[in-house]
Image (spheres, rainbow, N blue to C red):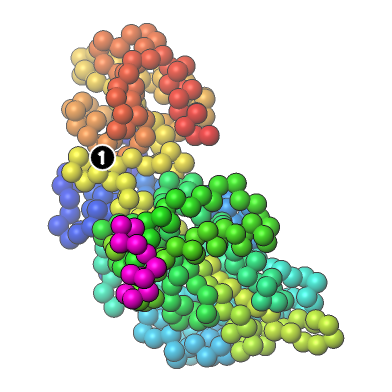
Amino acid sequence: MLFSKSFIPILKNNPSEAVIKSHKLMLRTGMIKQSSAGIYSWLPLGFKIMKKIEKIVRDEQDKIGAQELLMPTIQSSEIWKESGRYEDYGEEMLRIKDRQNREMLYGPTNEELITDIFRTSVKSYKSLPQLLYHIQWKFRDELRPRFGIMRCREFYMKDAYSFDITDDEAKFSYNKFFLSYLRTFKRLELSAIPMAADTGPIGGNLSHEFIILADTGESKIYTDKRIFEVNSDNTKVNKESLIDLRKDFEKYYAVTDEKYDKKIFEKEVPEEFRLKTKGIEVGHIFYFGDKYSQAMKASVDYQGKKEFVRMGSYGVGVSRLVGAIIEAKYNENDEIMKWPISIAPYECAIIPFIDKKNNTNLEKSKKVYDHLLKEGIEVILDDTDENFSSKIKKFNLIGIPFQIMIGNKTEENSFEFKELNENTQNISLEKIIKIIKNKKK
């Protein structure tokens, strides 16, 4: 991509309406544009990052055997009345009527709809377990939307649902998603802590939030610092290893404020390991047994009788993760944002010093650009006549992980190259390609 042809409307200064880092950066670098209160258009830069996050989320869901489908954003009120949640959900639900005066709603979540799909399609326990997920827009009519995409009304979310015949089988499915989330956040270079959490309007008696530490987070958290030492690498997807994985985390106190008990916290956690701070919720999983299946009569034939299936639901805020990663990684003082290479909008930026009287540097840059493209590296070339130092600052702000600087003293095959937050080095194009490809592995 040539920068002159890209749609990246960068602002010179932070917008006055933004308070937290992610909101400031996303507006300033042209990742999003507000359409109305709590609703945003995702512009090419931000949309590209979000779609890469979506790809990682999808990949980790597929690895545990979950199957993707797509449910609509608009739902009938009838299935919500069946479950008993239509009146209970509150004013966050956007209720509407169609031209036939039928009561409809913009889905804030999909437990009812997926249960309706299941009950009309699966009749025998031999078809279980079923793990189904989709990635779709949701709408919750927040009273006071704020902080950009972190607390907005319309958001992009992966929600999954499990169907099992027994509680033991259902908890195995729950633990699969527990592991899947740990792997997902690790690939995004986030340290996410699973914490016992309140089930809220979803219901049930087992729930974990996945929280990353951030001063701007809305969740108050209380945890034992030793939980960060738990290693979940190379965990196999079998019942024994997943039970052990949960136990490894759960032996350390880690809760959100809804579950916090000061006496228990101080009793179980030595003072030197106590951590009271704030965090951002990036995922939430629930097990709620037969709450929905019983209300909506979703049963299967099992041992000569009808048995209500056991269910769980599992959410990841795909669009919210964009903001969460910024909150975790953006150095606001130095105005440097470094995206993990797996989700960076481009992997490398070529930044030439352009002399209006001499096209030599630009021609060199175009040759490097073409070569990187042939090597499968996503690259953007700044072919504008902007001041050279301003270009550097711009790409530091955008957060592309690698930069190649090309000036009048650039030799035939020795380029000024750097990884953000690292020292500059002069190396060959072949070595540059090798470094970037190794980082992508």
SS class, disc 1: loop
Q: Give the residue pinned by disc 1.
A: 336
The residue lying at 29 percent from left, 78 percent from top is: 143
Q: Establish if 247 lies above or below 291.
A: above
Residue range in magenta is 262-274
Q: Could you tell me what secondary structure mostly forms the magenta stretch?
A: helix
Instruction: Looking at the picture, tell me which residue is in the foreground, 348 or 292.
Output: 292
Q: From where the camera sits, is residue 74 visible?
A: no
85 up-or-down from 335: above or below: below
Image x and y of residue 286, in percent: 53, 72
Residue 270 colored in magenta in the image: yes
- The answer to which of 21 and 232 lies nearer the viewer is 232
Quarter of the N terminus within the rendering: top left
Q: Dot 1: within a 10 Å radius of its alpha carbon, few (fewer than 14), some, or many (20 or more) residues? A: many
Q: Position of residue 422 (x, y in %)?
A: 31, 29
* Residue 399 drawn above or below residue 93: above
Q: Residue at x 64, y 66 (%)?
A: 173
